[in-house]
Amino acid sequence: MVEDKRFISGDDAVAFGARLARPHVISAYPITPQTVVVERLSEMVEDGSLKAEFMHVESEHSAISAAMGVSVTGARVFTATSSQGLLYMAEGLFYSAGGRFPIVMMNANRSLALPWSIYGDQSDSLSQLNSGWIQVYVEDAQEVLDMIIQAYRVAEDPSVLTPFMVNLDGFLLTHTYEPVSIPDQAMVDAFLPPFSTHNKISFEKPLNIGFSTTPQDNLEYKYQQHKAMLDSVEVIQKVDAEFAERFGRRYGGLVEEYFCNDAEVVLVTLGSVTGTARVVVDRMRETGRRVGLLKIRYMRPFPVNEVNRVCETVKRVGIIDRDISFGYEGTVFTNVNSALSRLNNPPETVNFICGLGGRDIPKEDLEGMFLQLLDGSGSGKLERVQFIGMRVSINDR
Amino acid sequence: MIDKEIKRLNARNITDREFFYGHKACPGCGGSLAVRLALKVIGERSCSVLPAGCMSAVGFIYPQMAFTANAMISTFPGTASLLSGIAAGARALGIEDFHAVGFAGDGGTADIGIQALSGAIDRNDKIIYICYDNEAYMNTGIQKSGLTPYGTRTTTSPAGQNLPGSITHKKRLFEIVAAHGIEYAAVASMGYPIDYMNKVNKAKHCRGTSFIHVYASCPTGWGTPTETSIEVAKEAVDCGLWVLAEYEKGEFRLTRKPKSFTSVEDHLKKQGRYRHLSERDLSEIVRHRDDNWERIRSAWKV
């Protein structure tokens, strides 16, 4: 078979991935930089290459609400959003996770107002970590296409039944063109069977869905949701392995390690900055610097074991955050430290806040981070939370 | 469009089956009666959607489920959008002879839910949306909504030295819905239950979006005896404060044309929420009623 390879954007790749997953309904509202996704999907519905209904919903709140409606009939649904839109559907995020509706959504990572910015960072999705959605962050267009397909397999697994958010960096990935291999439909069909669930309306056995609980039962429901998220770890790894077997691309499950084996220091990344960091690692390795890179793919479920395995033998760990929990630190940093606290002798950790609102993260900055981690500060500890490349001076109290 | 003759429903030919019972609504609750009677018309091949509000609060407390057909609680603003999704999913899977029906209160419809309702009508999704209007946020404790009439005492529009209760009149919800060019819309009252059920039956036979705005007494929020719920809802129509009407094929129609009105004052003074009203407030309410009817008669060409 001749490989179908195309030069397309990240958003295009999302649309191709969604089409291959054969959703019955697309329920989405336009927002920059997600718009190309909904445009492509609309075109695919129009030209008949995607046998689905495109619902022109009037808001993101309705997009996720309608997606739940589709799912409760037992049909497969896809949606996509970004930034303010993700926040506008926040109620529905928690709701759909609690209702155990395996909706798959693409989120174009974008800054949150104020100040308004259409450019990328990851404060939108990281602010929704507690919503009960599985969250994966991708590095390029091929990965996003593949992850949309994998997302349905994981989300719809009977032991998981949890919605799945595929995150890709706004503009840096959504609007960058790359060569992408489009999998064969028949192969995807063999990998991803039609959606089947008991969590749906029925005329033989009618259901009351999305009910209230008294304090007597609530904890048990929330625990089952928690358990499903924990159980998804195994499913994610199994699906990643099976995908690799069938399509020849393996992503490593919850994390991907790059030169971590003998690393003295490790930088933790999420999303597109990983690509730049690989180049920096290669360059520094050439001069004998023992630097490594840990790409976190899944923020939920969080790769506790993987992070600890990589970090327990290194001197220092730097964590890049394209977000900031104001008055404290970056969200990825908090999560990594929480995992590392289970080690007997956790390494020193440093939080690099950068790339906010679309600010570039140049190779020089990444190299600077590695050098700090390698060299330390002499006697004391490194500054714990650092804003990289700040263009204003900070008034110390 | 509703393209065929529909058999008229009456007390004798409706089903004895119950699709909403064992719930915990207050005695005399008009909203729960609206749900019960509508589901008798719509039947079991359905999925009811109820947002946060009285009916979801009284009907879905695990493990006591009061709906014997499929039902689901939606988000507060999301009744119509969840219905739309259900309709789209059912269509995609080829599920036929199926009805997605929503029951939302006045606040859930005219305030927080109006965006989703507007979108659903715009898409002309095949859904039935029933707004049971008890004229305030009753579930949370009688707070003012966009459909609370002028002069109504609620817990957030208290009547006192300075204010007569609510100082705004009701939004014209029926006309807002009609202005979308909806396939079928109607206004009904639990005081005229057979009329209501026949409107639900019309909605059931509608191929696109349909909407029913039904006046539903709330003894708890209105300060009325529980056994007068039907009577009070009937009086509201008879004194002209509520209108029974339909909107179909682009035209408005009155389904009850009153020759004269009964006393507004007698009707209101029976209700705790209006007992404080002054002469001036009463005349403002009557003036608004008369203006409304004048507008209806000229604009609706009835």
Image (spheres, rainbow, N blue to C red):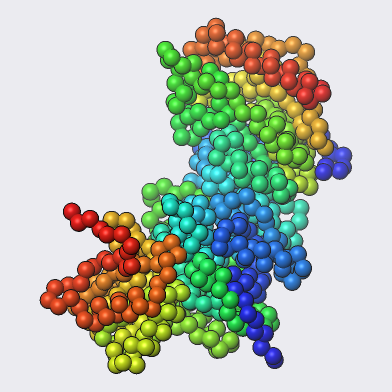
Q: Which residue is drawn at 48% across and 82% down?
A: A251
Viewer-proximal residue among B193 and B156: B156
Report the residue that reaches farthest toward the left: A379
Quadrant of the snapshot with the C terminus of chain B: top right
| For residue B195, side relative to residue B172 (left or right) | right
Q: Residue at x 59, y 20 (%)?
A: B228
Is residue A162 among what the camera can see? Answer: no
| For residue A98, side relative to residue A187 (left or right) | left
Query: In which image quadrant can residue A368 be found?
Result: bottom left
Q: Which residue is drawn at 58% across and 33% down?
A: B106
Viewer-proximal residue among A100 and A123: A123
Residue A117, horizontal then vertical, whole percent: 47, 57
Q: Which residue is drawn at 59% across and 66% down?
A: A197
Residue A352, horizontal then vertical, whole percent: 31, 69
Q: How many marks?
A: 0
Query: In which image quadrant can residue A41 be found?
Result: bottom right
Quadrant of the snapshot with the N terminus of chain B: top right
| For residue B180, side relative to residue A220 (left or right) | right
Residue B268, horizontal then vertical, whole percent: 57, 14
Viewer-proximal residue among A388 and B206: A388
Is residue B140 among what the camera can see? Answer: yes
Viewer-proximal residue among B164 and A385: A385
| For residue A126, side relative to residue A246 (left or right) | left
Residue A169 higher or lower than B134, as above or below = below
Residue B224 higher or lower than A217, as above or below = above
